[in-house]
Image: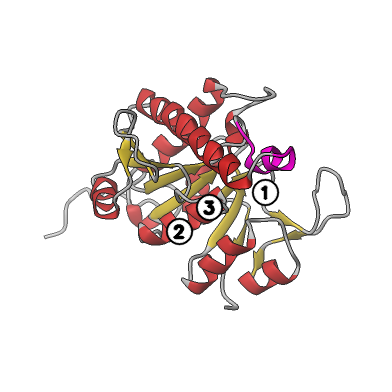
Amino acid sequence: APHPNPLPIPSEGEWGEGDFMSTLKYKRLLLKLSGEALMGKGAYGIDMSVAGRLAADIAEATRAGAEIAVVVGGGNIFRGLSGAAKGMDRATADYMGMLATVMNALAFQNALERQGTPARVLSAIPMPTVCESYVRPKALTYMAKGQVLVFAAGTGNPFFTTDTAATLRAIEMNCDAVAKATQVDGVYSADPKKDPTAHRYDRLTYAEVLAKDLKVMDGAAIALARDNGLPVLVFSIEEPGNLLKALRGEARATVIAGGA
């Protein structure tokens, strides 16, 4: 017999945080954060209040049932290309940049754990006294247990950007998408802060990104995503709570997919 006082069924959008994972369009996501995102308004280094805000967004997403991995860049500490331009060997500069990402990853792990979110730093360059080495089966086990993974040291190889590392790890972790967090709400034909006539794209194909030479990710990362059918989301991380909106497919963002 039916219950005498059945509970009303919430309409779409009324579910509370953490209710049904089915509300997530992307359940498993790789989030790419630039090193500069951690600087806040500083000229360099890490602003832990900014790291805390970003960690809070990730904590909110994990409570909603999402599985999140993060790749952090190192530009706030060391920019490999600028070092190479000043006479340093490019490979040496890139290794120094990889070490900078480890520092950022440790800081971000700390910010996540302060939010009560268990997190692990996995480095492509072994440094056992500092963090664990990246081993794919171990990483998949951690992720399935709901731990946030923070991947450090890029791919472990020079001449590859952290964008490429993010795309590679997203594919290895069987993610539904890789999300590039930026200061603007998607991909534009030019820098919207410098060119008020810049056109914003809602959707792009991988081929269009490469043909138009849009500065979303480097070409190797876009080609890797294309060859593995991995969608790329570009959205703003400036608005608190936007990560969960992106996971639900509700954020204002550019989606790069198809046209392979």
Considering every residue shown, the one lying at the far left of the view is 1
Which amino acid is tagged 3? Ala
Q: To which residue does mark 1 refer?
A: 185
Q: Is residue 123 left or right of residue 86?
A: left
> Disc 3 to disc 1, how far (Cα)?
12 Å
Under circle 1, the secondary element is loop
Query: Which label sits on residue 168?
Result: 2
Label whose residue precedes the other's in the sequence (3 or 1)? 3
Could you tell me which quadrant the C terminus lies in? bottom right
Give the residue displayed 88% in from the left and 49% down from the top. 196
Give the SS element for disc 2: helix
Residue 63: image location, x then y, percent: 34, 40
Kindly identify the amino acid type of the residue bearing the numbered disc 2. Leu
In space, the residues marked 2 and 3 are separated at their CA atoms by 13 Å
Magenta residues (range): 78-87
| 102 part of magenta stretch | no
Label 2 environment density (alpha carbons within 10 Å; few <14, some 14–19, many ≥20): some
Q: Are marks 3 and 1 in contact (CB under 8 Å)?
A: no
> Disc 3 designates what residue?
179
